[in-house]
């Protein structure tokens, strides 16, 4: 197997995995949108906008990932300049969006925290008033994911049935979810933003460089695998 064939099949495998990832993201988005336990969140005037905006973004991102993965797979196997051109165009859009999202997230960190916290409080209050199953499942996912419980962190607000099981003194007092949300975003958001900006800048630079030099699609394939494959290819 020569070097170009190795690059071609390596790119096919990578893009097939990317396509599978997009399928999974799309499936999760559709499940959250149409599952009987969560579709109630999309109904009514007081429906949490942050939640359904996130779900629709999941659906759109999953669909786009599937298209990009398909173009990458077919373009690599057929060595089609048209498909590879579309593949890199979509890739450019994705990573340019990552740069924009990373910059926006870093510059609007407090607003992001406030919006997510407000979404949680709104969902929690609506659940206390309606006992809606969709709201219950959403709160359980947040509580178990962040290891927190309620707005105050105590069982006095009636959140025992939707919180993780605790032992000892944590039976009475545990971490409140607004505090957990603040901690997660303050400790992780700058990392996610930096990664998004870094990857986006690398991929945009590579694409612009290849466009200006007028290199062949095969060389683009090699550079793509080089950057995503840890700096080298051994065949």
Image (cartoon, rainbow, N blue to C red):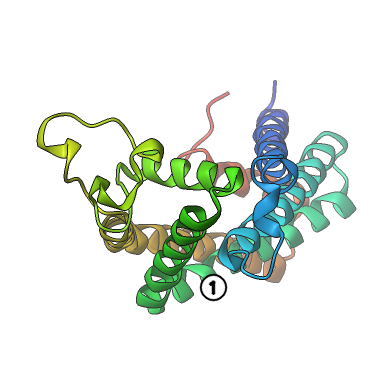
As rendered, which of 175 and 221 lies closer to the eye? 175
| Screen quadrant of the C terminus | top right
As rendered, which of 93 and 110 lies closer to the eye? 110
Quarter holding residue 42: bottom right
- The residue pinned by badge 1 equals 100
Give the left or right position of residue 121, taking residue 75 as reference: left
Furthest toward the left, the residue is 169
Residue 41 at what x, y percent from top left?
Answer: 64, 55
Q: Residue at x 38, y 63 (%)?
A: 194
Quarter holding residue 151: bottom left
Residue 38 appears in the figure: yes
Quarter holding residue 95: bottom right
| Screen quadrant of the N terminus | top right
As rendered, which of 44 and 211 lies closer to the eye? 44
Residue 58 appears in the figure: no
Give the left or right position of residue 169, taking residue 126 as reference: left
Residue 126 at what x, y percent from top left?
Answer: 51, 59
Q: Residue at x 58, y 59 (%)?
A: 51
């Amino acid at each position: 197997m020569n070097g170009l064939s190795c690059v071609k099949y390596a790119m096919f495998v990578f893009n097939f995995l990317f396509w599978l990832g997009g399928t999974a993201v799309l499936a999760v988005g559709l499940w959250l949108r149409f599952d009987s336990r969560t579709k109630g969140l999309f109904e009514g005037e007081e429906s949490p906008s942050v939640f359904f905006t996130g779900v629709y973004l999941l659906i759109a991102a999953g669909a786009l990932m599937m298209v990009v993965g398909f173009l990458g797979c077919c373009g690599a196997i057929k060595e089609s300049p048209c498909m590879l051109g579309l593949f890199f165009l979509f890739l450019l859009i994705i990573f340019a969006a990552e740069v924009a999202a990373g910059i926006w997230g870093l510059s609007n960190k407090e607003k992001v925290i406030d919006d997510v916290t407000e979404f949680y409080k709104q969902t929690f209050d609506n659940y206390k008033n309606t006992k809606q199953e969709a709201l219950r499942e959403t709160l359980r996912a947040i509580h178990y994911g962040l290891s927190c419980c309620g707005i105050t962190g105590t069982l006095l607000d009636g959140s025992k049935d939707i919180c993780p099981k605790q032992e000892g003194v944590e039976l009475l007092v545990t971490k409140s979810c607004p505090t957990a949300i603040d901690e997660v975003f303050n400790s992780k958001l700058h990392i996610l933003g930096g990664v998004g900006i870094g990857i986006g800048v690398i991929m945009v630079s590579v694409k612009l460089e290849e466009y200006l030099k007028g290199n062949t699609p095969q060389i683009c394939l090699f550079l793509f695998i080089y950057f995503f494959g840890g700096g080298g290819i051994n065949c």
